[in-house]
Image (spheres, rainbow, N blue to C red):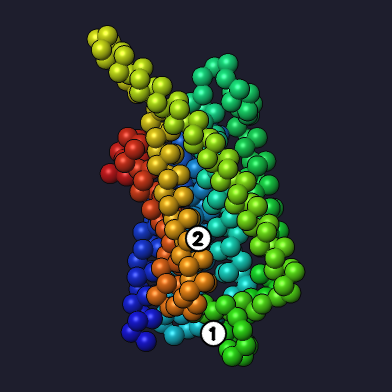
Amino acid sequence: MSLRFFKGTFSFFISGLGIAGNTFILLYYMHMFKGSKKKYVHIVFIHLAFTNIIMLLSKVIPTTLAAFGMENFLEDIGCMIFVYLERVTRGLCICTSSLLTLVQAIIISPRGSVWRELKLRSVWHILLPLLFFWILNSLISMNLLFHIKNISSMNISQPSVSDTYCYFVPDNLIIRWIFLILMVLRDAVFQGIMGVASGYMVFLLHKHHQRVLYLQNSNFLYKTSPEMKAAYSVLLLMLCFLFFYWTECILSLFSNAFLENNYMLENIQEYLRVGYAILGPFLLTPKDRNLTECWH
């Protein structure tokens, strides 16, 4: 009981930090978007922060209440809603982060570049891929709507993948593999886009750095543009995402192969799944002078 209470308190604390940070990012970019210089990257930041907030809430509310001995408060519908939202927002986080990298690469690309042809003509056109992300991830997670049960409504002895408050009842093997393949394809495609866009940004930032050194040696005063500073922030954010994503994947494979039903490892995996959502806002703030001043 004491271990469960500690886990719930710790989850509440770190998730609260993440929710506060993402709320700040959300409000800041909403304020920026209301200004005269509307940028479609602002909408992407708003969507990413909103997604992170929903993901953290869907994780922290059941975990915290279960820690205080309230596992049965959810019922089957409650379990279905929270677990489904967590899965959908996790997929949205991958897609939106990929889009953010692509948008930032387009912003800093030089005129006449092939990347410039991808630039959207209207700031509202960015809503179309975001809507597509919601539809895609909602469909990929549909199997959860039929196979998530509350702990009190089923026999614990039957095979299932357990959580502290909800159970996943194994479905048809073929259906399970179909949804698993769809999730793997989604992650591979969007991380591929993220990798190409990030590599292109690294190339441009390297050229920018060489130009700065040349201008400094030529006694010219040169200041880094806000777009370049934003590119550094986005690259740092993507490195953070890849670290948490692949660390969680490796631990998951290791757990399934060698340490099945290891309580400590399962808890570490849980925190790795939401680590990017918690840490992301605090990586963005120090790199943006306006964000830092607004925070203070």
Mark 2 and mark 1 lie on one chain; the one further toward the N terminus is 1
Question: Where in the figure is residue 124, as x and y percent of width and height?
Answer: 63, 35
Badge 2 amino acid: Cys
Residue ID for mark 1: 72
What is the spatial separation of the Cα atoms under label 2 and label 1, in whole angstroms? 30 Å
Q: Residue at x 61, y 22 (%)?
A: 114
SS of the residue at dot 2? helix
- Residue 118, quarter of the rendered image: top right
Q: Residue at x 41, y 22 (%)?
A: 207
Q: Which image quarter is the N terminus in?
A: bottom left
SS of the residue at dot 1? helix
Q: Residue at x 36, y 46 (%)?
A: 283
Horizontal arrangement in the rendering, residue 131 relative to residue 211 (left or right):
right
Horizontal arrangement in the rendering, residue 142 relative to residue 97 (left or right):
right
Near mark 2 (Cα within 10 A), the count class, few <14, some 14-19 or many ≥20, is: some
Residue ID for mark 2: 249
The answer to whether any part of residue 217 appears in the image is yes
Q: Nearer the viewer, residue 114 or 51?
A: 114
191 w.r.t. 32: above or below: below
Mark in the foreground, 2 or 1: 2
Question: Where in the figure is residue 94, as x and y percent of width and height?
Answer: 55, 50
Q: Which image quarter is the C terminus in?
A: top left
